[in-house]
Amino acid sequence: MTTPLLDVRDLVVEYHVRGGSFRAVDTVSFTVHKGRTLAIVGESGCGKSTIACAIVRLLKPSSGQILLDGTDIAPLSERRMRPLRSRVQMVFQDPYASLDPHLSAQDIVAEPLRLRGVRSAAERRATAAELIDRVGLPSSALERRPAEFSGGQRQRIGIARALASSPELLVCDEATSALDVSVQAQVLALLEDLQRDTGLTCIVISHNLGVVRQISADVVVMRAGRVVESGPTADVLAAPKEPYTRALRRAALDPTAMTGRKPRAFVTAREEIPA
Amino acid sequence: MSTTHPGPARVQRSGPGPSAVTPKHLARAKITRQRRGSRLKLWAGLVCTLVVVIPVALARVLPLPGPDQQDLASRRLAPFTDGHLFGTDQLGRDLLSRVLHGGQVSLLVGLLAVVVSGLIGIVLGAAAGYFGGWIDTVVSRLLEAQLSLPLLMMLLLVVALFGPSIPVITFVIAIAQWPEVARLTRSLVLVEREKPYVAAARVLGLHRLAILLRHVLPNVVKQASLVVLLLLAQAVLLESALSYLGAGPQRPFATWGRIISDGQDYITTSWWMVTLPGLVIVALVVGVNLLGDGLRDRARRRKVSTS
Amino acid sequence: MSAALLDVVDLQVELITAGGVVRAVDGVSFTIGEGETVTVIGESGSGKSTTAMAVLGLLPDDLAVLSGSVRFGDTDVIAEPGALRAVRGRTVSLIPQDPMTALSPVHTIGRQLVEAVRLRRPELAKRDAEARAVELLDLVHVPRSTEQLGRYPHQLSGGMLQRVLIAIALAGEPRLLVADEPTSALDVTVQAGILGLLLELQESTGIGILMITHDLGVARLVSDRIHVMRDGRFVESGDVEAVVDHPSHEYTRKLLSAVPVLGPWDEDGTAAGGDR
């Protein structure tokens, strides 16, 4: 196979805390090929969001490599990283705080265009309007500010802003977990559309196995900073091998797949899962 | 809750059942009381401020004797005699005219001082909060140093060294006030810079300074500038205090502090010479504080309702 | 069926907000009997939490105007708000949404639990109240219960804190629990443990549960009956199997279709063994 778009090798991220350091991500490796989607799934504190932040270089890994199309971006300084930033973009978890409250939707989406060197303001505004239309918002949205939008609409603006940089890789960090389920479905559908139409490569960070199954071909299951299990999503979900993955799968409640009435007990407490 | 009969309340969406909200409910609702309170503050503040500011601004236009026009025949006249609304002082000068003309100097110094301290405070506070590191250390130490010094002594010393001209006094008051603005701006920026939209701007590839100027500052400047308004009252007080101590703008400028200081020798025989200028200062300070408070309440409520 | 623990008829809640009067709950009726779990499910802004808070009388007087009736046994707490104090904590208790912030951070678990025990039984001596507290912690499967009494909330995980909060709710020996999104702040494996605990408690004590959730999976697992709420009204109500497996209202269908499907899986681990 060709070189992967993203090749993460032995990634380690340590946080310095009082009296030592804490390993949030512990020698994690995975690859993402062009046009594919990889999901990183796990519970809170497993290190999945830390990996997302390392890939977009919001933080600097302690060791390991992050090869973007063959270039290792892990050790780059902020200054050396800046020209590469447009290639990897991110959609954030919190729809309420990830958009600058004092800018209009159009200005938010137009900002990355200026960084890409689009000189004419009219051209930037026109492209921003196209992107906002592409993510399914009406043209009346252009002049409005983030506070006037619902959570789902804000995530659409966040996606449009990321797309404005024409990224090769899009990292979605729990992009739908703050949304209602029906809104989540719409945003997921939009992401699926974008994947299909533009061949966008995605990394999806999620705690929700259902979301992972819906939009990603491959999955990495994490726990306590380490990879527990990985493989094609369909296989991992249909026949999880590791006890932790099985516990996750059992605890994920799919209303349409349940049979019978209220069970008398339903216990897979964390203490019972072998570490 | 004995009243459940339908009342004439505004209901956004009409359901099958009648509304149980009565005017009594509406009147004692928290939101109604809050809104009434802040509206009262705004109005009272506005009235008090304007009652002082408008006459001061129009001092030259109003049909008044000059502030330095002496008339030794009519010394220390009580208020409301011979057309002297506030009475006259020990040299027979019209007190109202002196208060209004003096107010021009006092307000001008106050405004200038507040603008300068606001600028210094916002710039240093934002830089300290956003960049952290050595900038934060330096600014924070300066803030602490300023707190630990006897302020009025310092100000008197500076005035004694450089002379009591208006620029020096403006600068001195600004130096006294910037820490409040800086401390507030710093804490606002500390909160703001952790928000994901700042991270988003970094991921887009914006330079750190550009993020501060384009994204962080516009979101804190409104709250910071409301505090600057509250400082205006303090600046006027400080200027009066300096004048009272003899370190204010020199004659012929009749500032509020100097008028009071001149009048205090006569407080037992001519109460108005101290009391009336004092009341004018009180009206302005209370008015500006109420206004600033009311505006802050309103801004806060708006923020709550949108989040 | 015996007399209902909770009987809500035409409950209406109007909130006086900056934007005018909003009818957050618009004439809902439901009952909960002994040993039953009744779930109100809805998306944000549907009024489901407001319903729970209204039932418990926890909405501030100067914000909300209630009408209709909420009866615990023979007591209508809307007609006589004074009766609420007698009902709350004894007949009905709340399990809050966010376990991390629901306990006082400066007091030990033991002190807060003992306080709850003594509210119900003031006659107990300190030692007996502590014994009762340990008993309650054992009931909710908090390991090393005696040790935990001396610990502070920040020393416990979210799942353990939620168990402590359930113990505190049970200290009043209520007949009904109101659980307002009790697991939405927790990880799924921890959620499974908490839901399992609630099912087990109900099995052993016959306590009634009013469950508020946005999660259809949770609702399907623990409920006997569910009410689908939207814009302050119930759009569909009924037996859990009927509503989830054969939804009749369009909104319920839309909600169900929005839940990502997980597909079948090899639950018994036979494939992992490799011989089939």
Image (spheres, coloured by chain):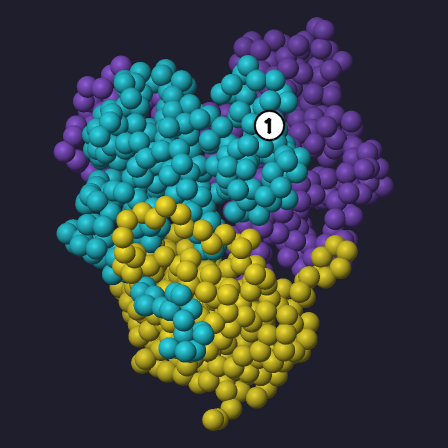
Chain colours: A yellow, B purple, C cyan
Badge 1: few (under 14), some or many (20 or more) residues near its Cα, within 10 Å? some
Q: Which of B101 and A126 is in front in this view?
A: A126
Left or right: B182 with respect to B250? left
Among all residues in the image, which is located at the extreme front?
C275
Q: Position of residue C251 (x, y in %)?
A: 20, 52
What residue is drawn where x is 30% and y is 42%? Answer: C39
Q: Nearer the viewer, residue B101 or B178?
A: B178
Q: Position of residue A192 (x, y in %)?
A: 33, 73
Residue A218: name its quadrant.
bottom left
Q: Which amino acid does label 1 sit on?
A: Ala
Left or right: A117 with respect to B68? left
Secondary structure at numbered mark 1: helix
Q: Mark 1 lies on which chain?
A: C
Q: Position of residue C179 (x, y in %)?
A: 39, 38
Left or right: A134 with respect to B245? left
What residue is drawn where x is 78% and y is 27%? Answer: B245
Q: In this view, does B286 lie above or below C161?
A: above
Residue at which label 1 appears: C131
**Which image quarter holds the C terminus of chain A?**
bottom right
What residue is drawn where x is 20% and y is 22%? Answer: B7
Q: Can residue C66 be seen in this view?
A: no
Count of numbered badges drawn on the protein: 1
What residue is drawn where x is 52% and y is 29%? Answer: B290
Q: Position of residue B232 (x, y in %)?
A: 60, 36
Among all residues in the image, which is located at the extreme top?
B269
Q: In this view, does A217 lie above or below C237?
A: below
Q: Nearer the viewer, residue B64 or A157?
A: A157
Left or right: C39 with respect to B175? left
Q: Can residue C142 be seen in this view?
A: yes
Q: In this view, does C85 lie above or below A85?
A: above
